[in-house]
Image (cartoon, helix red, strand yellow):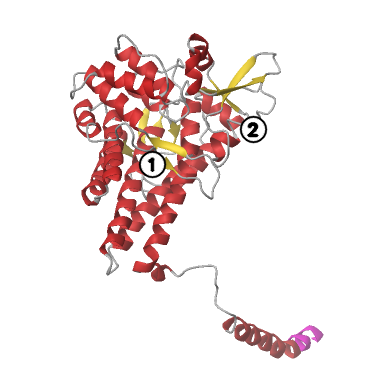
């Protein structure tokens, strides 16, 4: 009885407290560190949104490239290096990747966010009435180009099974590699169609050629590479102006050596000391008293990451020629690359030699995984992961994918 009386006495105070809280909440100042979605659909916000896409690209590109090099035969993980302690890196290196690998989950999410932000930018451009058409073109170019690059990354880096590459978009069905690469090309061609800047047009042509190369479509690769970057053109980079090139520097370089490079890169330098100009190496003594080598191409955390160079474009044209597509002098193209690195010219070139030149020239740029998979030169026997698996959290959330 006493409890009932107490409740009757307290009820008015409870209601007063609730009403007071509601009044307090309704009179707080508006949030100032969040933007309402509809307020972003203005011409004035297009530069801001474009920079957001580019920033996500910058934080994704070197991360993914480092992990792809680790999965390939370009880099290694060993616990014999005292500063190495990430078992998720060891799984990737051995191709024995668990579906809950946190490192893979992180990079898969980063690539997915890049794709989402880029596609969202294109959609928002369509909702805005522009007074300055150059702003519209610039934003559309950014959305199309990086949306294409994100699809290219998904196609060459991830897989549904050990030997079934491809990805997913917006919790949809699995998209095989070939179809994803087609989508990547379509996006990048849309970017190319609206771009008037000569340098950006050439860089985009080179990126389209690379997507065709991943498909072993040498005819189209040759066509677009012929319109790509040429000697003297600057590097197309992922810019790290206000974010760190954390992976190559922080996990495979001067920041912390967990991931080393394959010893063959030191063999290249021993065989020709001039190669040290493009294959920059540091050394660390392992707990097993073995000398391991790590990359010094990115000696600082603020180093930008190269996405496409005229040298890579030259090597793509040369490969296409050697495979019977396009036109040009393959040896001259390769020797122009070597000359730019102060190396002596070769006297002959074939496909095997061309792949060695790619191995050296594209040192720690993330290209080796694609090259091994497209040429059938995998280095680990047995049924191992040749791509990073679409992680379990994505599969569990996506009814279109089989669970692991």
**Dominant secondary structure of the magenta stretch?**
helix
* Residue 24 versus residue 68 in the image, above or below: below
In the image, taking residue 375 as reference, residue 300 lies left or right, namely right
In the image, taking residue 357 as reference, residue 12 lies left or right, namely right
Distance from label 2 to label 1 (Cα)? 37 Å
Extent of the magenta region: 1-7
SS category of the residue bearing label 1: loop
Q: State the residue position of label 2.
A: 256
Q: Quadrant of residue 85?
A: top right
Residue name at image x 47 percent, y 68 percent: 35
Residue name at image x 23 percent, y 44 percent: 189
Residue name at image x 23 percent, y 48 percent: 190
Q: State the residue position of label 1.
A: 401
Mark 1: few/some/many CA within 10 Å (<14, 14-19, 20+): some
In the image, is residue 167 part of the stretch drawn in magenta? no
**Is residue 77 in sight in this rendering?**
no
Q: Locate residue 218, reporting x and y percent.
A: 22, 26
């Amino acid at each position: 009885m006493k409890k009932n009386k107490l409740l009757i006495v307290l009820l008015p105070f409870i209601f007063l407290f609730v009403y007071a809280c509601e009044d307090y909440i309704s009179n707080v100042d508006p949030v100032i560190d969040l933007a309402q979605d509809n307020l972003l659909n203005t011409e004035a916000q297009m530069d801001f949104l474009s920079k957001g896409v580019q920033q996500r690209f910058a934080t994704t590109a070197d991360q993914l490239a480092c992990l792809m090099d680790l999965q390939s035969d370009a880099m290694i993980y060993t616990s014999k290096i005292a500063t190495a302690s990430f078992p998720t890196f060891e799984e990737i290196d051995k191709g024995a990747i668990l579906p809950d690998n946190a490192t893979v989950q992180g990079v898969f999410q980063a690539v997915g966010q890049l794709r989402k932000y880029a596609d969202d930018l294109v959609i928002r451009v369509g909702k805005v009435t522009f007074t300055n058409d150059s702003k519209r073109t610039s934003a559309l170019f950014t959305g199309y180009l990086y949306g294409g690059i994100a699809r290219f990354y998904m196609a060459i880096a991830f897989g549904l099974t050990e030997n079934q590459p491809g990805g997913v978009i917006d919790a949809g069905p699995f998209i095989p590699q070939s179809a994803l690469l087609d989508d990547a090309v379509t996006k990048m061609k849309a970017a190319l169609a609206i771009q008037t800047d000569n340098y950006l047009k050439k860089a985009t042509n080179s990126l389209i050629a690379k997507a065709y190369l991943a498909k072993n479509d040498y005819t189209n690769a040759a066509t677009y590479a012929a319109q790509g970057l040429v000697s003297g053109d600057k590097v197309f980079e992922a810019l790290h102006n206000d974010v760190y090139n954390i992976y190559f520097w922080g996990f495979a370089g001067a920041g912390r050596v967990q991931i080393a490079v394959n010893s063959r890169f030191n063999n290249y330098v021993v065989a020709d000391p001039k190669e040290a100009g493009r294959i920059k190496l540091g050394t660390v003594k392992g707990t097993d008293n073995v000398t391991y080598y790590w990359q010094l191409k990115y000696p600082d955390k603020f180093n930008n990451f190269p996405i496409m160079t005229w040298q890579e474009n030259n090597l793509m044209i040369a490969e296409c020629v050697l495979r019977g597509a396009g036109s040009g002098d393959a040896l001259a193209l390769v020797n122009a690359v070597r000359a730019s690195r102060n190396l002596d010219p070769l006297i002959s070139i074939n496909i095997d030699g061309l792949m060695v030149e790619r191995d050296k020239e594209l040192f720690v740029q993330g290209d080796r995984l694609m090259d091994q998979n497209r040429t059938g030169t995998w280095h680990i026997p047995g049924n191992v992961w040749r791509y990073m698996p679409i992680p379990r959290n994505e599969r569990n959330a996506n009814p279109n994918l089989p669970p692991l």
